[in-house]
Amino acid sequence: MRACIILHNMILEDERDTYSQYWTDYDQSEASGSGTLEPFSTEILPAFVNHVRARSVMLSTSFIIKMANSLRVPNLIGGKFVESKSLTFIDVINPATQDVVSQVPLTTNEEFKAAVAAAKKAFPSWRNTPITKRQRVMLKFQELIRRDMDKLAISVTTEQGKTLKDAQGDVFRGLEVVEHACGMATLQMGEYVSNVANGIDTFSIKEPIGVCAGICPFNFPAMIPLWMFPVAVTCGNTFILKPSEKDPGASMLLAQLAMEAGLPEGVLNIVHGAHDTVNAICDHDDIKAISFVGSNVAGMHIYARAAAKGKRVQSNMGAKNHAIVMPDASVDATINALIAAGFGAAGQRCMALSTVVFVGGSKPWESILVEHAKALKVNAGTEPDADLGPIISIQAKERIHKLIQSGFESGARLLLDGRSIVVPGYESGNFIGPTILADVSSDMECYKEEIFGPVLLLTEADSLDEAIKFVNENKYGNGATIFTRSGVAARKFQTEIEAGQVGINVPIPVPLPFFSFTGNKASFAGDLNFYGKAGVNFYTQIKTITQNWKDSVNNDKINMAMPTSQKSFE
Protein backbone atom coordinates (compact mmCIF):
# COMPACT_ATOMS: atom_id res chain seq x y z
CA MET A 1 0.00 0.00 0.00
CA ARG A 2 1.25 3.47 -0.88
CA ALA A 3 2.69 5.34 2.10
CA CYS A 4 0.47 8.07 3.47
CA ILE A 5 2.18 11.39 4.10
CA ILE A 6 0.72 13.23 7.06
CA LEU A 7 1.04 16.97 7.58
CA HIS A 8 1.71 17.54 11.27
CA ASN A 9 0.06 20.83 12.09
CA MET A 10 -2.00 22.17 14.93
CA ILE A 11 -5.72 22.23 14.30
CA LEU A 12 -8.54 23.54 16.42
CA GLU A 13 -10.23 21.15 18.78
CA ASP A 14 -13.57 21.46 16.99
CA GLU A 15 -11.95 20.67 13.62
CA ARG A 16 -10.58 17.26 14.61
CA ASP A 17 -13.60 15.35 13.31
CA THR A 18 -13.33 17.04 9.91
CA TYR A 19 -9.76 15.98 9.39
CA SER A 20 -10.25 12.56 10.98
CA GLN A 21 -13.02 11.95 8.43
CA TYR A 22 -10.67 13.09 5.66
CA TRP A 23 -8.11 10.48 6.66
CA THR A 24 -10.79 7.82 7.00
CA ASP A 25 -11.93 8.58 3.45
CA TYR A 26 -8.33 8.61 2.27
CA ASP A 27 -7.58 5.20 3.79
CA GLN A 28 -10.73 3.73 2.24
CA SER A 29 -9.67 5.18 -1.10
CA GLU A 30 -6.26 3.56 -0.75
CA ALA A 31 -7.68 0.21 0.32
CA SER A 32 -10.04 0.12 -2.65
CA GLY A 33 -7.21 0.93 -5.01
CA SER A 34 -9.04 3.90 -6.48
CA GLY A 35 -6.53 6.42 -5.11
CA THR A 36 -9.00 9.26 -5.68
CA LEU A 37 -7.93 11.30 -2.66
CA GLU A 38 -4.47 12.77 -2.32
CA PRO A 39 -2.97 13.59 1.10
CA PHE A 40 -3.21 17.32 1.61
CA SER A 41 -4.52 18.46 -1.71
CA THR A 42 -4.44 22.14 -2.56
CA GLU A 43 -7.99 22.36 -1.22
CA ILE A 44 -7.24 21.07 2.25
CA LEU A 45 -3.76 22.54 2.82
CA PRO A 46 -4.95 26.16 3.26
CA ALA A 47 -7.35 25.01 5.95
CA PHE A 48 -4.48 23.48 7.87
CA VAL A 49 -2.38 26.61 7.52
CA ASN A 50 -5.30 28.68 8.83
CA HIS A 51 -5.66 26.47 11.89
CA VAL A 52 -2.05 26.42 12.97
CA ARG A 53 -2.82 28.91 15.70
CA ALA A 54 -4.16 26.40 18.17
CA ARG A 55 -2.26 23.74 20.05
CA SER A 56 -3.88 20.42 19.52
CA VAL A 57 -3.47 17.40 17.30
CA MET A 58 -0.19 17.03 15.38
CA LEU A 59 -0.57 16.15 11.73
CA SER A 60 2.19 17.75 9.63
CA THR A 61 4.45 17.95 6.63
CA SER A 62 7.22 16.09 8.28
CA PHE A 63 7.41 12.75 6.49
CA ILE A 64 5.72 10.13 8.61
CA ILE A 65 4.83 6.67 7.39
CA LYS A 66 1.34 5.74 8.50
CA MET A 67 1.79 2.05 9.13
CA ALA A 68 -0.35 0.36 11.73
CA ASN A 69 -1.21 3.83 13.07
CA SER A 70 2.48 4.51 13.68
CA LEU A 71 4.02 7.98 13.65
CA ARG A 72 7.51 6.58 13.22
CA VAL A 73 9.80 8.19 10.68
CA PRO A 74 11.21 5.57 8.29
CA ASN A 75 14.65 5.02 6.88
CA LEU A 76 15.13 5.38 3.13
CA ILE A 77 17.09 2.41 1.83
CA GLY A 78 17.49 1.54 -1.83
CA GLY A 79 14.58 3.71 -2.92
CA LYS A 80 12.14 2.33 -0.33
CA PHE A 81 10.82 4.04 2.80
CA VAL A 82 11.17 1.31 5.40
CA GLU A 83 10.09 1.44 9.03
CA SER A 84 13.03 0.68 11.28
CA LYS A 85 13.19 -2.48 13.37
CA SER A 86 14.93 -0.51 16.11
CA LEU A 87 13.66 -0.88 19.65
CA THR A 88 14.65 2.70 20.48
CA PHE A 89 12.98 5.83 19.13
CA ILE A 90 13.48 9.53 19.83
CA ASP A 91 10.47 11.81 20.11
CA VAL A 92 10.39 14.75 17.71
CA ILE A 93 8.95 17.61 19.78
CA ASN A 94 7.19 20.75 18.59
CA PRO A 95 9.18 23.39 20.55
CA ALA A 96 6.19 25.74 20.74
CA THR A 97 3.84 23.20 22.34
CA GLN A 98 5.89 20.21 23.60
CA ASP A 99 3.61 17.93 21.58
CA VAL A 100 5.18 14.82 20.06
CA VAL A 101 5.17 15.22 16.28
CA SER A 102 6.77 11.92 15.33
CA GLN A 103 9.36 9.39 16.45
CA VAL A 104 12.79 8.92 14.93
CA PRO A 105 14.52 5.54 15.15
CA LEU A 106 18.05 4.86 16.23
CA THR A 107 18.74 3.10 12.94
CA THR A 108 20.10 -0.39 13.55
CA ASN A 109 23.55 -1.41 12.39
CA GLU A 110 22.03 -3.83 9.90
CA GLU A 111 19.84 -1.08 8.44
CA PHE A 112 22.79 1.27 8.21
CA LYS A 113 24.88 -1.32 6.39
CA ALA A 114 21.98 -1.97 4.03
CA ALA A 115 21.78 1.75 3.22
CA VAL A 116 25.50 1.92 2.44
CA ALA A 117 25.27 -1.26 0.37
CA ALA A 118 22.39 0.26 -1.61
CA ALA A 119 24.42 3.41 -2.25
CA LYS A 120 27.45 1.38 -3.28
CA LYS A 121 25.36 -0.75 -5.62
CA ALA A 122 23.80 2.31 -7.26
CA PHE A 123 27.12 4.12 -7.78
CA PRO A 124 28.48 2.44 -10.97
CA SER A 125 25.37 3.04 -13.06
CA TRP A 126 24.75 6.51 -11.63
CA ARG A 127 28.30 7.73 -12.25
CA ASN A 128 27.97 6.54 -15.85
CA THR A 129 24.67 8.34 -16.32
CA PRO A 130 25.27 11.28 -18.68
CA ILE A 131 25.79 14.49 -16.79
CA THR A 132 23.05 16.16 -18.80
CA LYS A 133 20.58 13.58 -17.50
CA ARG A 134 21.77 14.10 -13.92
CA GLN A 135 21.26 17.83 -14.43
CA ARG A 136 17.73 17.26 -15.70
CA VAL A 137 16.92 15.42 -12.48
CA MET A 138 18.03 18.51 -10.56
CA LEU A 139 16.02 20.77 -12.86
CA LYS A 140 12.90 18.75 -12.06
CA PHE A 141 13.87 18.60 -8.38
CA GLN A 142 14.06 22.38 -8.04
CA GLU A 143 10.69 22.66 -9.77
CA LEU A 144 9.14 20.27 -7.23
CA ILE A 145 10.71 22.12 -4.31
CA ARG A 146 9.08 25.32 -5.54
CA ARG A 147 5.78 23.49 -5.88
CA ASP A 148 5.93 22.19 -2.31
CA MET A 149 7.60 25.21 -0.71
CA ASP A 150 4.72 25.73 1.73
CA LYS A 151 4.61 22.08 2.79
CA LEU A 152 8.33 22.11 3.46
CA ALA A 153 8.07 25.37 5.39
CA ILE A 154 5.26 24.04 7.59
CA SER A 155 7.36 20.99 8.39
CA VAL A 156 10.34 23.15 9.33
CA THR A 157 8.22 25.43 11.51
CA THR A 158 6.42 22.63 13.32
CA GLU A 159 9.56 20.66 14.14
CA GLN A 160 12.18 23.41 14.46
CA GLY A 161 10.07 26.38 15.57
CA LYS A 162 11.16 29.21 13.27
CA THR A 163 8.52 31.43 11.72
CA LEU A 164 6.85 30.31 8.50
CA LYS A 165 8.43 33.20 6.60
CA ASP A 166 11.86 32.28 7.94
CA ALA A 167 11.20 28.62 7.15
CA GLN A 168 10.45 29.56 3.56
CA GLY A 169 13.81 31.33 3.50
CA ASP A 170 15.40 28.15 4.87
CA VAL A 171 13.99 26.20 1.93
CA PHE A 172 14.76 28.89 -0.64
CA ARG A 173 18.44 29.25 0.28
CA GLY A 174 18.78 25.49 -0.18
CA LEU A 175 16.87 25.68 -3.44
CA GLU A 176 19.50 28.10 -4.76
CA VAL A 177 22.14 25.39 -4.35
CA VAL A 178 19.98 22.95 -6.33
CA GLU A 179 19.63 25.56 -9.07
CA HIS A 180 23.41 25.97 -9.18
CA ALA A 181 23.86 22.19 -9.40
CA CYS A 182 21.77 22.28 -12.58
CA GLY A 183 24.86 23.71 -14.29
CA MET A 184 27.17 20.91 -13.15
CA ALA A 185 28.47 20.21 -16.66
CA THR A 186 30.28 23.53 -16.55
CA LEU A 187 31.26 23.28 -12.88
CA GLN A 188 32.74 19.80 -13.33
CA MET A 189 34.82 20.63 -16.39
CA GLY A 190 38.46 19.59 -16.34
CA GLU A 191 41.42 21.15 -18.16
CA TYR A 192 43.19 20.37 -21.42
CA VAL A 193 46.58 21.31 -22.85
CA SER A 194 47.55 19.99 -26.26
CA ASN A 195 51.09 19.21 -27.37
CA VAL A 196 52.70 19.52 -23.94
CA ALA A 197 55.57 17.62 -25.53
CA ASN A 198 56.18 16.35 -29.05
CA GLY A 199 52.85 14.73 -30.02
CA ILE A 200 51.70 14.44 -26.41
CA ASP A 201 48.49 15.93 -24.94
CA THR A 202 47.51 16.16 -21.27
CA PHE A 203 44.07 16.71 -19.80
CA SER A 204 42.32 16.32 -16.46
CA ILE A 205 38.80 15.27 -15.53
CA LYS A 206 36.83 15.54 -12.27
CA GLU A 207 35.40 12.17 -11.34
CA PRO A 208 32.91 11.28 -8.59
CA ILE A 209 34.47 9.62 -5.57
CA GLY A 210 31.78 7.12 -4.58
CA VAL A 211 29.50 6.93 -1.56
CA CYS A 212 29.36 10.22 0.38
CA ALA A 213 27.53 11.08 3.60
CA GLY A 214 26.02 14.14 5.23
CA ILE A 215 25.32 14.76 8.92
CA CYS A 216 22.88 17.63 9.46
CA PRO A 217 22.10 20.05 12.33
CA PHE A 218 18.69 21.04 13.65
CA ASN A 219 18.76 24.74 12.82
CA PHE A 220 18.35 24.53 9.03
CA PRO A 221 16.48 21.27 8.38
CA ALA A 222 15.91 22.08 4.69
CA MET A 223 18.84 24.27 3.66
CA ILE A 224 21.72 22.16 5.00
CA PRO A 225 20.64 18.86 3.38
CA LEU A 226 20.30 20.84 0.15
CA TRP A 227 23.85 22.13 0.59
CA MET A 228 24.97 18.52 0.55
CA PHE A 229 23.28 15.83 -1.50
CA PRO A 230 22.25 17.80 -4.64
CA VAL A 231 25.87 18.79 -5.30
CA ALA A 232 27.19 15.33 -4.45
CA VAL A 233 24.75 13.33 -6.57
CA THR A 234 24.89 15.68 -9.56
CA CYS A 235 28.66 15.13 -9.55
CA GLY A 236 27.85 11.42 -9.94
CA ASN A 237 28.17 10.22 -6.35
CA THR A 238 25.62 8.39 -4.22
CA PHE A 239 24.67 9.63 -0.77
CA ILE A 240 23.81 8.68 2.81
CA LEU A 241 21.98 11.48 4.65
CA LYS A 242 21.52 11.63 8.41
CA PRO A 243 19.07 14.40 9.32
CA SER A 244 18.98 15.87 12.79
CA GLU A 245 16.98 13.66 15.10
CA LYS A 246 15.20 16.83 16.28
CA ASP A 247 13.61 17.71 12.92
CA PRO A 248 13.91 15.05 10.20
CA GLY A 249 10.67 15.88 8.38
CA ALA A 250 12.04 18.28 5.77
CA SER A 251 14.77 15.84 4.76
CA MET A 252 12.23 13.08 4.27
CA LEU A 253 10.04 15.29 2.12
CA LEU A 254 13.04 16.41 0.07
CA ALA A 255 14.02 12.79 -0.49
CA GLN A 256 10.54 11.99 -1.75
CA LEU A 257 10.71 14.96 -4.13
CA ALA A 258 14.16 13.92 -5.36
CA MET A 259 12.86 10.48 -6.26
CA GLU A 260 9.79 12.00 -7.89
CA ALA A 261 12.23 14.07 -9.96
CA GLY A 262 13.83 10.87 -11.23
CA LEU A 263 16.67 10.13 -8.81
CA PRO A 264 17.22 6.36 -9.12
CA GLU A 265 16.88 3.90 -6.26
CA GLY A 266 19.88 3.84 -3.96
CA VAL A 267 21.38 7.14 -5.10
CA LEU A 268 20.00 8.87 -1.99
CA ASN A 269 19.51 6.98 1.26
CA ILE A 270 18.49 8.26 4.70
CA VAL A 271 19.36 6.85 8.11
CA HIS A 272 18.60 8.23 11.55
CA GLY A 273 20.04 8.21 15.03
CA ALA A 274 22.58 9.88 17.25
CA HIS A 275 26.16 9.06 18.26
CA ASP A 276 26.22 5.44 17.10
CA THR A 277 24.97 6.35 13.64
CA VAL A 278 27.52 9.16 13.37
CA ASN A 279 30.34 6.83 14.37
CA ALA A 280 29.14 4.21 11.89
CA ILE A 281 29.31 6.83 9.13
CA CYS A 282 32.84 7.77 10.18
CA ASP A 283 34.02 4.16 10.32
CA HIS A 284 32.47 2.52 7.25
CA ASP A 285 35.13 1.84 4.62
CA ASP A 286 32.76 2.34 1.69
CA ILE A 287 31.98 5.95 2.65
CA LYS A 288 34.59 8.20 1.04
CA ALA A 289 33.59 11.71 2.16
CA ILE A 290 31.58 13.28 4.99
CA SER A 291 29.91 16.68 5.16
CA PHE A 292 28.95 17.95 8.61
CA VAL A 293 27.34 21.05 10.10
CA GLY A 294 26.94 21.38 13.86
CA SER A 295 28.75 21.98 17.12
CA ASN A 296 32.51 22.08 17.61
CA VAL A 297 32.53 19.06 19.90
CA ALA A 298 30.74 16.89 17.36
CA GLY A 299 32.51 18.45 14.39
CA MET A 300 36.03 17.86 15.67
CA HIS A 301 35.12 14.32 16.72
CA ILE A 302 33.84 13.56 13.22
CA TYR A 303 36.80 15.27 11.56
CA ALA A 304 39.37 13.34 13.61
CA ARG A 305 37.65 9.96 13.47
CA ALA A 306 36.83 10.08 9.77
CA ALA A 307 40.18 11.54 8.72
CA ALA A 308 41.91 8.72 10.59
CA LYS A 309 40.05 6.36 8.26
CA GLY A 310 41.30 8.27 5.22
CA LYS A 311 38.04 10.05 4.44
CA ARG A 312 37.52 13.55 3.16
CA VAL A 313 35.73 15.75 5.69
CA GLN A 314 34.22 19.22 5.54
CA SER A 315 33.08 20.25 9.01
CA ASN A 316 31.24 23.54 9.56
CA MET A 317 31.08 24.22 13.28
CA GLY A 318 30.46 26.95 15.85
CA ALA A 319 30.66 30.69 15.46
CA LYS A 320 30.82 34.01 17.26
CA ASN A 321 30.01 36.50 14.55
CA HIS A 322 30.85 40.14 15.15
CA ALA A 323 29.63 43.44 13.77
CA ILE A 324 31.80 46.54 14.06
CA VAL A 325 29.72 49.71 14.04
CA MET A 326 31.57 52.89 13.11
CA PRO A 327 30.34 56.32 14.31
CA ASP A 328 29.47 57.30 10.73
CA ALA A 329 27.18 54.31 10.15
CA SER A 330 23.60 54.95 9.05
CA VAL A 331 21.61 54.66 12.26
CA ASP A 332 18.31 53.33 10.90
CA ALA A 333 19.85 50.84 8.46
CA THR A 334 22.36 49.60 11.04
CA ILE A 335 19.81 49.16 13.82
CA ASN A 336 17.46 47.24 11.53
CA ALA A 337 20.32 45.00 10.39
CA LEU A 338 21.52 44.30 13.94
CA ILE A 339 18.02 43.44 15.15
CA ALA A 340 17.28 41.14 12.21
CA ALA A 341 20.66 39.38 12.23
CA GLY A 342 20.83 39.10 16.02
CA PHE A 343 17.32 37.88 16.78
CA GLY A 344 16.12 36.26 13.55
CA ALA A 345 15.42 32.52 13.93
CA ALA A 346 15.73 33.17 17.68
CA GLY A 347 19.49 33.45 17.16
CA GLN A 348 19.76 29.81 16.10
CA ARG A 349 21.90 30.46 13.02
CA CYS A 350 25.59 29.77 12.57
CA MET A 351 25.77 33.20 10.91
CA ALA A 352 23.73 35.06 13.53
CA LEU A 353 25.27 38.34 14.67
CA SER A 354 25.89 37.73 18.34
CA THR A 355 28.38 40.48 19.25
CA VAL A 356 28.41 44.17 18.35
CA VAL A 357 31.54 46.29 18.78
CA PHE A 358 30.72 50.01 18.81
CA VAL A 359 33.68 52.18 17.88
CA GLY A 360 33.46 55.36 19.94
CA GLY A 361 30.98 54.01 22.49
CA SER A 362 27.66 52.18 22.54
CA LYS A 363 25.64 54.51 24.75
CA PRO A 364 24.02 56.49 21.88
CA TRP A 365 22.86 53.21 20.31
CA GLU A 366 21.63 51.31 23.37
CA SER A 367 18.21 52.85 23.88
CA ILE A 368 17.38 52.56 20.17
CA LEU A 369 18.41 48.90 20.10
CA VAL A 370 16.33 48.11 23.17
CA GLU A 371 13.32 49.93 21.77
CA HIS A 372 13.45 47.99 18.50
CA ALA A 373 14.10 44.66 20.23
CA LYS A 374 11.15 45.17 22.58
CA ALA A 375 8.89 45.67 19.58
CA LEU A 376 9.61 42.18 18.24
CA LYS A 377 6.77 39.69 18.57
CA VAL A 378 7.70 36.36 20.17
CA ASN A 379 5.22 33.64 19.29
CA ALA A 380 4.79 30.20 17.79
CA GLY A 381 6.30 30.20 14.33
CA THR A 382 2.94 29.34 12.82
CA GLU A 383 1.40 32.59 14.05
CA PRO A 384 1.28 35.22 11.29
CA ASP A 385 2.57 38.03 13.53
CA ALA A 386 5.58 36.14 14.90
CA ASP A 387 9.03 37.71 14.47
CA LEU A 388 10.86 34.92 16.28
CA GLY A 389 9.77 31.54 17.50
CA PRO A 390 10.90 29.16 20.25
CA ILE A 391 14.27 27.63 21.06
CA ILE A 392 14.67 24.06 19.79
CA SER A 393 14.54 22.29 23.18
CA ILE A 394 14.06 22.74 26.90
CA GLN A 395 17.73 21.84 27.43
CA ALA A 396 18.87 24.51 24.98
CA LYS A 397 16.63 27.07 26.68
CA GLU A 398 18.13 26.25 30.09
CA ARG A 399 21.66 26.55 28.71
CA ILE A 400 20.92 29.98 27.24
CA HIS A 401 19.41 31.11 30.56
CA LYS A 402 22.60 30.12 32.36
CA LEU A 403 24.82 31.99 29.90
CA ILE A 404 22.72 35.14 30.27
CA GLN A 405 22.94 34.87 34.04
CA SER A 406 26.69 34.28 33.96
CA GLY A 407 27.14 37.44 31.89
CA PHE A 408 25.10 39.47 34.33
CA GLU A 409 26.97 38.05 37.33
CA SER A 410 30.29 38.79 35.61
CA GLY A 411 29.49 42.49 35.34
CA ALA A 412 27.60 42.92 32.08
CA ARG A 413 24.64 45.30 32.09
CA LEU A 414 21.38 43.53 31.32
CA LEU A 415 19.61 46.08 29.12
CA LEU A 416 16.84 43.71 28.08
CA ASP A 417 15.99 40.37 29.68
CA GLY A 418 13.82 37.97 27.70
CA ARG A 419 14.02 35.00 30.04
CA SER A 420 10.67 35.50 31.74
CA ILE A 421 8.56 35.80 28.61
CA VAL A 422 5.32 33.82 28.49
CA VAL A 423 3.46 33.41 25.20
CA PRO A 424 -0.33 33.21 25.67
CA GLY A 425 -1.67 29.97 24.29
CA TYR A 426 1.82 28.46 24.20
CA GLU A 427 2.78 28.59 27.86
CA SER A 428 4.82 25.39 27.65
CA GLY A 429 6.86 26.55 24.67
CA ASN A 430 10.64 26.99 24.75
CA PHE A 431 10.50 30.75 24.37
CA ILE A 432 13.17 33.32 25.15
CA GLY A 433 12.58 36.94 24.25
CA PRO A 434 15.23 39.23 22.78
CA THR A 435 17.97 39.81 25.33
CA ILE A 436 20.72 42.45 25.28
CA LEU A 437 23.85 42.46 27.45
CA ALA A 438 26.15 45.52 27.39
CA ASP A 439 29.72 46.07 28.62
CA VAL A 440 30.63 42.51 27.71
CA SER A 441 34.32 41.58 27.90
CA SER A 442 36.24 38.79 26.21
CA ASP A 443 36.79 36.85 29.45
CA MET A 444 33.07 36.39 30.11
CA GLU A 445 31.57 32.95 29.55
CA CYS A 446 28.69 34.45 27.58
CA TYR A 447 31.23 35.81 25.11
CA LYS A 448 33.51 32.77 24.90
CA GLU A 449 30.64 30.34 24.29
CA GLU A 450 28.38 30.27 21.25
CA ILE A 451 25.03 31.12 22.83
CA PHE A 452 22.83 30.07 19.89
CA GLY A 453 19.86 32.05 21.13
CA PRO A 454 18.26 35.51 20.86
CA VAL A 455 21.00 37.24 22.83
CA LEU A 456 22.93 40.26 21.57
CA LEU A 457 26.21 41.20 23.27
CA LEU A 458 27.46 44.79 23.16
CA THR A 459 31.00 46.01 23.72
CA GLU A 460 33.06 49.08 22.87
CA ALA A 461 36.37 50.02 21.24
CA ASP A 462 38.19 53.33 20.96
CA SER A 463 39.30 52.78 17.38
CA LEU A 464 38.83 50.55 14.35
CA ASP A 465 42.25 49.01 15.03
CA GLU A 466 41.17 48.08 18.55
CA ALA A 467 37.87 46.67 17.29
CA ILE A 468 39.56 44.52 14.64
CA LYS A 469 42.04 43.24 17.24
CA PHE A 470 39.16 42.31 19.55
CA VAL A 471 37.36 40.37 16.81
CA ASN A 472 40.51 38.61 15.60
CA GLU A 473 41.35 37.36 19.09
CA ASN A 474 38.15 35.31 19.13
CA LYS A 475 38.75 31.67 18.18
CA TYR A 476 35.89 31.53 15.68
CA GLY A 477 36.02 32.77 12.11
CA ASN A 478 32.69 32.18 10.41
CA GLY A 479 31.68 35.74 9.62
CA ALA A 480 32.17 39.39 10.51
CA THR A 481 30.72 42.63 9.22
CA ILE A 482 31.27 46.37 9.43
CA PHE A 483 28.75 49.17 9.21
CA THR A 484 30.28 52.38 7.89
CA ARG A 485 30.08 55.01 5.16
CA SER A 486 33.86 55.13 4.83
CA GLY A 487 35.46 53.21 1.99
CA VAL A 488 38.84 53.53 3.73
CA ALA A 489 37.49 51.90 6.92
CA ALA A 490 35.71 49.20 4.92
CA ARG A 491 38.83 48.33 2.94
CA LYS A 492 40.96 48.17 6.07
CA PHE A 493 38.37 45.91 7.68
CA GLN A 494 38.08 43.49 4.76
CA THR A 495 41.86 43.22 4.55
CA GLU A 496 42.69 42.77 8.23
CA ILE A 497 39.71 40.89 9.66
CA GLU A 498 40.22 37.16 10.30
CA ALA A 499 36.92 35.66 9.19
CA GLY A 500 35.97 33.60 6.19
CA GLN A 501 32.88 35.58 5.24
CA VAL A 502 33.04 39.35 5.42
CA GLY A 503 30.16 41.78 5.16
CA ILE A 504 30.33 45.50 4.45
CA ASN A 505 26.98 46.98 5.47
CA VAL A 506 25.65 43.43 5.04
CA PRO A 507 24.60 41.80 8.34
CA ILE A 508 24.71 38.11 7.35
CA PRO A 509 27.27 37.73 4.55
CA VAL A 510 26.37 34.19 3.47
CA PRO A 511 27.53 33.81 -0.15
CA LEU A 512 25.23 32.68 -2.92
CA PRO A 513 25.98 29.22 -4.35
CA PHE A 514 28.27 30.35 -7.16
CA PHE A 515 30.72 31.22 -4.37
CA SER A 516 31.31 28.92 -1.38
CA PHE A 517 30.51 29.04 2.33
CA THR A 518 33.97 29.87 3.65
CA GLY A 519 34.09 29.90 7.44
CA ASN A 520 37.55 29.46 8.91
CA LYS A 521 39.59 29.26 12.14
CA ALA A 522 37.68 27.20 14.75
CA SER A 523 34.49 27.46 12.70
CA PHE A 524 35.70 25.01 10.05
CA ALA A 525 37.79 21.87 9.76
CA GLY A 526 38.77 20.49 6.39
CA ASP A 527 40.26 21.74 3.15
CA LEU A 528 37.27 22.31 0.87
CA ASN A 529 34.17 24.29 1.81
CA PHE A 530 30.48 23.81 1.08
CA TYR A 531 28.84 24.35 -2.33
CA GLY A 532 30.21 26.50 -5.16
CA LYS A 533 33.47 25.45 -6.82
CA ALA A 534 34.89 24.24 -3.51
CA GLY A 535 31.89 21.97 -3.01
CA VAL A 536 32.28 20.44 -6.46
CA ASN A 537 35.98 19.84 -5.79
CA PHE A 538 35.11 18.21 -2.45
CA TYR A 539 32.82 15.67 -4.10
CA THR A 540 35.16 14.89 -7.00
CA GLN A 541 38.71 13.67 -7.53
CA ILE A 542 41.01 14.74 -10.32
CA LYS A 543 42.31 12.24 -12.84
CA THR A 544 45.05 13.46 -15.19
CA ILE A 545 45.53 11.71 -18.55
CA THR A 546 48.63 12.04 -20.69
CA GLN A 547 48.31 10.54 -24.18
CA ASN A 548 50.66 9.96 -27.06
CA TRP A 549 49.29 8.99 -30.48
CA LYS A 550 51.75 8.45 -33.35
CA ASP A 551 51.20 7.78 -37.02
CA SER A 552 53.93 5.14 -37.26
CA VAL A 553 55.78 2.74 -35.03
CA ASN A 554 58.59 4.38 -33.09
CA ASN A 555 61.82 2.51 -33.86
CA ASP A 556 63.99 4.66 -31.59
CA LYS A 557 66.18 2.92 -29.07
CA ILE A 558 64.96 2.49 -25.53
CA ASN A 559 65.71 5.63 -23.52
CA MET A 560 66.21 4.95 -19.82
CA ALA A 561 66.51 8.61 -18.84
CA MET A 562 63.79 10.51 -16.99
CA PRO A 563 61.17 11.60 -19.58
CA THR A 564 61.11 15.35 -20.23
CA SER A 565 59.47 17.65 -22.72
CA GLN A 566 62.88 18.37 -24.24
CA LYS A 567 64.90 16.09 -26.54
CA SER A 568 68.09 17.14 -24.78
CA PHE A 569 69.21 19.35 -21.93
CA GLU A 570 71.35 21.50 -24.19
Image (cartoon, rainbow, N blue to C red):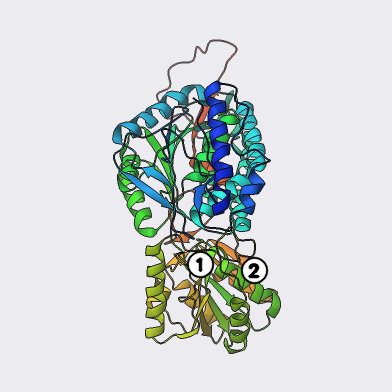
Q: Residue at x 63, y 83 (%)?
A: 368
The image shows a total of numbered marks equal to 2
Q: Secondary structure at mark 2?
A: strand
Q: Is residue 475 visible?
A: yes
Question: Which residue in the structure is indicated by mark 1?
Answer: 498
Q: Nearer the viewer, mark 1 or mark 2?
A: 2
In the figure, is residue 439 to the left or right of 202?
Answer: left
Question: Which residue in the structure is indicated by mark 2?
Answer: 504
Residue type indicated by callout 1: Glu
Residue 381 in percent (x, y) is at: 57, 60
The tag earlier along the polypeptide, 1 or 2, is 1
In the figure, is residue 456 to the left or right of 307?
Answer: right
Q: Residues within 10 Å of mark 2 (few under 14, many from 20)?
A: many
Residue 464 in percent (x, y) is at: 57, 80
In the figure, is residue 31 to the left or right of 307?
Answer: right
Q: Is residue 235 above or below residue 1?
A: below
Residue 178 in percent (x, y) is at: 61, 41
Residue type indicated by callout 2: Ile
Q: Residue at x 58, y 49 (%)?
A: 15
Inter-mark Cα distance, 1 to 2: 14 Å
Q: Is residue 568 visible?
A: no
Q: Secondary structure at mark 1?
A: loop
Q: Is residue 432 above or below residue 119?
A: below
Between 300 and 117, the one nearer to me in the picture: 117
